[in-house]
Image: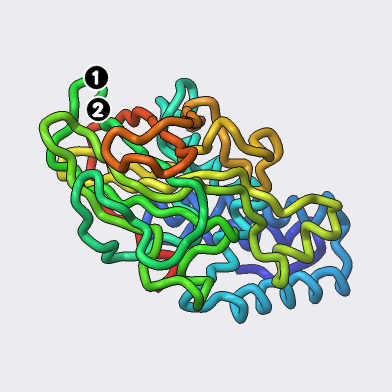
Amino acid sequence: MPIIANLEALTPAVLDVMAQTRDPRLREIMESLVRHLHGFVRETGLTEEEFRAATGVLNRMGQQTTDSHNEFVLMAGSLGVSSLVCLQNNGEGGSTETTQSLLGPFWRLNHPETGQGATIVRSDTPGPAMFAEFAFVDAAGQPVEGLEVDVWHASPVGLYENQDAGQAPYNLRGKFHTGADGRVRFRSVRPVGYPIPTDTTVGQLLEAQDRHPMRPAHVHVLAFKKGFKTLISQIYVDDTEWLTSDVQFGVTEALIGTLERHEGAHPEAGEIGPWFSLEHRFVLQEGEAKLPVPPIK
């Protein structure tokens, strides 16, 4: 590598070093990263003070990531990167609808095994009852039997159980298995929209941009079976605020579920006051079944 003569000589010199990377995919990524990162610095005229501030932000984000909170995943969603990666890798390269979506920062391993139709409410969780039914089909529209399905969502106070010492472990989480009909049924409470954490770096960014921190009400789904690409999804209820201004840019038409209010007795639970039903249909694609690395413990 030659001695750097001037500004214009720097980027080509770095690219020459990146070109020595043996792994072809890593080489492609690193060369593109250098071109775009150097281009960003040049385009914005980044100052030394701004550079030092930026490295400080990254340091704080690492310090703010814990067993129960992943600041980098939260930031990726708030910048639209998570949705971009998802859409680019599904729906025929983003050209068609997909029921794939964001994993989010709160998926955990080892959801409790839960029977069909059983409740995922595991501690005192006030709120209207919700009965959900999700159908899972393959690309030809046939039910997928033997799927392992995790479901989870935030409580009516807007917190996942790992964020809230007042909730029992794995409250509003469950693991189900589909039968021949390819369906999962469970009882919970109606989900609500909630703010993402605002006391960390992401919250500071939102405040600086005059953005709200709200997510529309949704239920998470992860479906796993050998022979299929692991389905990671979020279903947004159609009767909720912030559908068109989700702070994580996650809402697409294919992910909006039908939430219906019912006044009469539930056919199985009886008289429980007003209750809600949530239904949705998911399409799985053939592929390699791989579980993601959990963003939290």
Mark 1 neighbour density, 10 Å: few (under 14) some (14–19) many (20 or more) = few
Q: Residue at x 46, y 77 (%)?
A: 67
The three-letter amino acid code for the residue at tag 2 is Val
Disc 2 and disc 1 in contact, CB within 8 angstroms:
yes
The N terminus, quarter of image? bottom right
Q: Residue at x 56, y 75 (%)?
A: 65
Residue 22 position in % (x across, y down): 38, 60
Numbered marks: total: 2
Element type where label 2 sits in the image: strand
Q: Which residue is mark 1?
A: 141
Element type where label 1 sits in the image: loop
Residue 294 position in % (x across, y down): 38, 64
**For residue 146, above or below residue 48:** above
Q: Residue at x 47, y 61 (%)?
A: 125
The three-letter amino acid code for the residue at tag 1 is Gly
Furthest residue to the top? 140
Mark 2 neighbour density, 10 Å: few (under 14) some (14–19) many (20 or more) = some
Q: Which residue is mark 2?
A: 137
Q: Is residue 2 left or right of residue 110?
A: right
The C terminus, quarter of image? bottom left
Q: Nearer the viewer, residue 64 or 244?
A: 244
Residue 11 position in % (x across, y down): 69, 57
Which quadrant holds residue 142?
Answer: top left
Q: Is residue 117 left or right of residue 54?
A: left
**Mark-to-mark CA distance, 2 and 1:** 5 Å
**For residue 235, above or below residue 222:** above
